[in-house]
Image: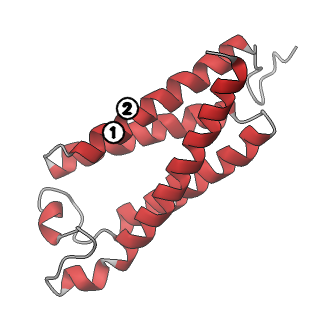
């Protein structure tokens, strides 16, 4: 896979994950009132949270919106300047952790979770590969060359 194809793939993934997390986070935050009234909201139901420490999707929604949505959007901006490989690595790790925690707390595995787990792994590993191939220095390291 060529250097430009890897860069384009990383950029595309950051944009798709960022937009998806932003929309998903907004939906989760807006679901609070309907779920408290016993309704479902865009496929979300209070029953999905029965094994979790949460009563609503507000805190998970804020994490999704702010960390994965905004974080991947900022990663995309830095990738345009060919500098966002470390943030891509961190965002990939965050997505993998987010999905794994989600599966554990919900005590179920859904197809969309598996898809985003794979996407997160690809984002993480592809960013790591770019860092290694391009010999990117560690940010804020005392051993800059």
Mark 2: few, some, or many residues within 10 Å (few <14, many ≥20)? some
Q: Which quadrant of the rendered structure holds the N terminus? A: top right
- Whole-percent x, y for residue 65 in the image: 49, 62
* Most foreground residue, 86 or 140: 86
Q: Is residue 41 left or right of residue 14?
A: left
Say which residue appears at 67% left-offset and 16% top-offset. 2
Hey, which residue is sitting farthest right in the picture?
145
Residue beneath disc 1: 115
Q: Is residue 67 visible?
A: no
* Secondary structure beneath label 2: helix
* Most foreground residue, 8 or 103: 8
- Whole-percent x, y for residue 103 in the image: 22, 44
Residue beneath disc 2: 118
Q: Which quadrant of the rendered structure holds the C terminus? A: top right
The image quadrant that residue 119 belongs to is top left
* 3 in relation to 77, above or below: above
């Amino acid at each position: 896979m060529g250097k430009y194809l890897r860069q384009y793939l990383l950029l595309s993934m950051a944009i798709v994950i960022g937009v998806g997390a932003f929309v998903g986070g907004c939906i989760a935050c807006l679901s609070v009132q309907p779920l408290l009234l016993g309704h479902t909201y865009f496929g979300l139901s209070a029953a999905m949270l029965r094994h979790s420490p949460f009563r609503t999707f507000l805190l998970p929604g804020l994490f999704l919106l702010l960390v994965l949505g905004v974080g991947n959007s900022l990663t995309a901006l830095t990738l345009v300047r060919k500098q966002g490989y470390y943030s891509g690595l961190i965002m990939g790790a965050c997505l993998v952790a987010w999905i794994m925690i989600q599966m554990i707390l919900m005590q179920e595995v859904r197809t969309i979770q598996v898809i985003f787990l794979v996407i997160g792994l690809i984002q993480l590993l592809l960013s790591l590969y770019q860092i290694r191939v391009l010999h990117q220095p560690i940010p804020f390291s005392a051993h800059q060359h």
